Image (spheres, rainbow, N blue to C red):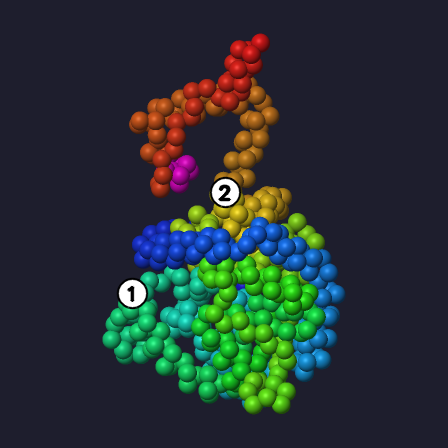
Amino acid sequence: MNPQPVSFHRRISTALADDQLRLALGRTTERFAAKRAAGLASLPDVDAVRDRARAIRLHTLSRLDTYLEQFEAAVSAAGGQVHWAADAKEASAIVLDLARARSVERVVKSKSMVSEEIALNETLIAAGLDVVESDLGEYIIQLAGETPSHIIAPAVHKTREQVGQLFADKFGVPVTDDVGEMTATARSVLREVFLRADMGVSGVNFGVAATGSLAIVTNEGNASLAVTAPRIHVAMMGIERLVPNLDDLAVMLQILARSATGQKLTVYTDLLTGPRRGDPDGPEELHVVLVDNGRSRLVGTEVGEILACIRCGACLNACPVYQQIGGHAYGSVYSGPVGAVLTPSLDDVGPWNTLPDASSLCGACREACPVRIDIPRMLLALRARSVRAGTAGRAVRVGFRLYRWAATRPWLFRRAVAAARWLTELLAADGWVQRLPPPLSGWTRSRDFPVIASRTFSERMRDRAGGAG
């Protein structure tokens, strides 16, 4: 995960000033959230299913080493080959070596967050290979020279009007904002890509330890073509993306599509076990690249629960921060609440210590998560880690030191509150302060600040206790 050179706060400011971005985010996140609610409502005993899904994910993580060994054996028995990658560099090198050894010139990819995480496209393109994304959203951002801004909707930051102009610029077609016309344009271009590709690269939604099967879900069918038309299929998979057996997979599929897009089941659900064996269709070779890249270090830690994530994107759509700034402001592959935990956890030496601050701790992400991951708890743990390491911002460090100094001296704290009350009353109009001096001006730049209450909580409790006596 390559950090962006611009600071997080600068990226936030840029995002908040982008009216087109706000329009695109408003259209999509609101629609996803509404569809998710309707989709889950259609599932009988939804709470029991979510509890079961959570238990499956946590159980798998608790015995991850055992299930990984079982998965490797099952893939090998089915005729596939498993490659273990300790980090991003090794994972990309494995794919490149496979391509070179088999004289691959053209690669078609279906959507894979892991390949984004390890910057696989950059490695392959730098080596002279032709790499084309086949997921429509991924294809759009590849044409635009951008990166994904959402886990399930990579081009969520673009309006259909912007995509229409992009296609007109790239393909010489008339400008349109009709989604059907734009999809037809992409389909006509991509069909030849599938037929000419030597290697297909995919992600993996779930690997089944008992059978060595790969579950890949899409709504466009591009993954089905990407993994069956080329002679070589390379599946990129984070080591945590396992379920023990097919019954457990069925539970996960019940909640994945509903949480992501509101569908009862994704349009295309491919369950692949090994390469073709006497069949006329399918790849001659299957290679599964198991990517660690910091994951094994998290198992059993205070942030290890984030590995239970099934990448549905529900927490992004529910998060009031993501709804305002979008994915690119986070600066890494994984954005939103899950990214604010996962990115600094996987890359603890990168400049990600401010990402956990991008949360109001409202708990909407925890409520939306289909496997009930306690993201707010982990955000607080990462904030505490940042403070202990001395990497928190200067304003945060100084502010909390002053607060601690005053809070441990009741007489000083009462005087400070009285002074703050007097100041806010002086600056207020109709009970609200519209402009505060720096550094508090950051608050009133986008919203008003309430006048501090005339009586403190402690004063009210003392009065109530006195009245009760």
Q: Residue at x 60, y 51 (%)?
A: 48
Q: Residue at x 56, y 14 (%)?
A: 465
Name the N-terminal-most of marks 1 and 2: 1
Amino acid type, residue under disc 1 in the picture? Glu
Quadrant including the C terminus: top right
Amino acid type, residue under disc 2 in the picture? Cys
Q: Measured along the vertical axis of the image, is residue 365 above or below residue 212?
A: above
User: Is disc 2 placed on a helix, strand or loop?
Assistant: loop
Q: Looking at the picture, how far across and down is residue 340, in whole percent? A: 53, 53
Q: Looking at the picture, how far across and down is residue 391, in whole percent? A: 57, 47
Residue 47 in magenta? no
Q: Measured along the vertical axis of the image, is residue 283 above or below residue 143?
A: below
Quadrant position of residue 205: bottom right
Q: Looking at the picture, how far across and down is residue 37, in whole percent? A: 46, 52
Tell which of 378 and 281 is nearer to you.
281
Residue 439 in magenta? yes
**Residue 363 in sight in this render:** yes
Magenta-highlighted residues: 437-444
Residue 219, which numbered label?
none
Q: In 3D space, how far apart are the residues under numbered discs 1 and 2 (Cα atoms)? A: 33 Å
User: Is disc 1 placed on a helix, strand or loop?
Assistant: helix
The residue to which callout 2 is attached is 362
Residue 161, which numbered label?
1
| Residue found at the very far front of the displayed protein | 44
Tell which of 371 and 110 is nearer to you.
371
